[in-house]
Amino acid sequence: MKNYVSIKDLPAEERPRERLLKRGASSLSNAELIAVLLGGGTAGVSAVNLAEKILAIDSGGIRILNDCVPEELYKIEGVGPARAACLLAAAELGRRLHDAPKQNRVSVSSPEKIASLFMSEMRCLKKENFKVLLLNAKNEIIMKDNVSVGSLMSSPAHPREVFSNALRRGAASVILVHNHPSGNPAPSREDLLLTERLVRVGEILGVEVLDHIIIGDGEYVSLRELGKI
């Protein structure tokens, strides 16, 4: 009769890997994080119990992974070359991430600057492309999100796609950008209705729509400057 609780015995929402994916890595303990890397336990020992044995190698706990050698990990029954390599690789990635230079993010300050970021890319496109700039609280660009590619006349943009990455990345605000293949950036009735709809959705979600830039052939229109936002 089995006298220990394996990861598979736990409810799905309590398993380390499932919790990490649902609630984020910060919700896991050191032992649970290591258990995810191990991928499983051994006969009679769960992945978490195996991880706890690894943490007990040294009084420093998780710091053991900073400077240990594979042979130290091999002493733990159930840890072979593959698992040791995985743990040491994860520790090295953590060090490199910590030491990586801070990313210099571009700050947007005007519709002209936003248009300049997209003009060369979008002015000659034969189909309408809809993009979203995700911004943090300092109006720095987090991400350029390609939302949709449409026809010669339209590029459908559903609120779900527009705000999906904004919510995932914790954006404070967004700027909508799309092109007119005709070269004329004057907003259509559909452009105004879509913008109005997305502004309302943004208000509900707590993500402000700062502007909607329409790119033409060498010229642009800002709906905020037109007073439409």
Image (cartoon, helix red, strand yellow):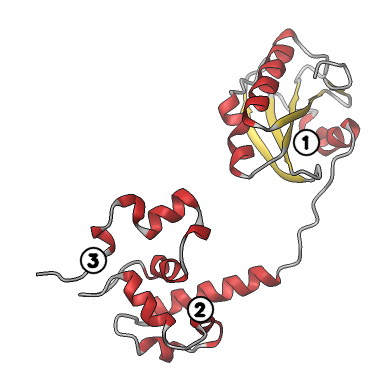
Instruction: Write down the quadrant of residue 133 in the picture.
Output: top right
Whether residue 82 is visible to the viewer of this picture, yes or no, is no
Task: Pick the quarter of the image with the C terminus.
Answer: top right
**First of labels 2, 1 by sequence position:** 2
- Vertical side of 174 occupied by 151: above or below: above
Q: Give the number of marks.
A: 3
- In the picture as drawn, the residue positioned furthest to the top comes out as 189
Identify residue type, mark 2.
Ile
Q: Which residue is mark 3?
A: 5
Q: Residue at x 36, y 81 (%)?
A: 53
> Marks 1/3: CA distance?
56 Å
**First of labels 3, 2 by sequence position:** 3
Tag of residue 62: 2
Q: Residues within 10 Å of mark 3 (few under 14, many from 20)?
A: few
Instruction: Write down the quadrant of residue 129 in the picture.
Output: top right
Q: Secondary structure at mark 1?
A: helix
Tag of residue 121: 1
- Residue 51, horizontal then vertical, whole percent: 38, 75
Q: Residue at x 76, y 20 (%)?
A: 180
User: Nearer the viewer's eye, disc 2 or disc 1?
Assistant: 2
Instruction: Write down the quadrant of residue 115 in the picture.
Output: top right
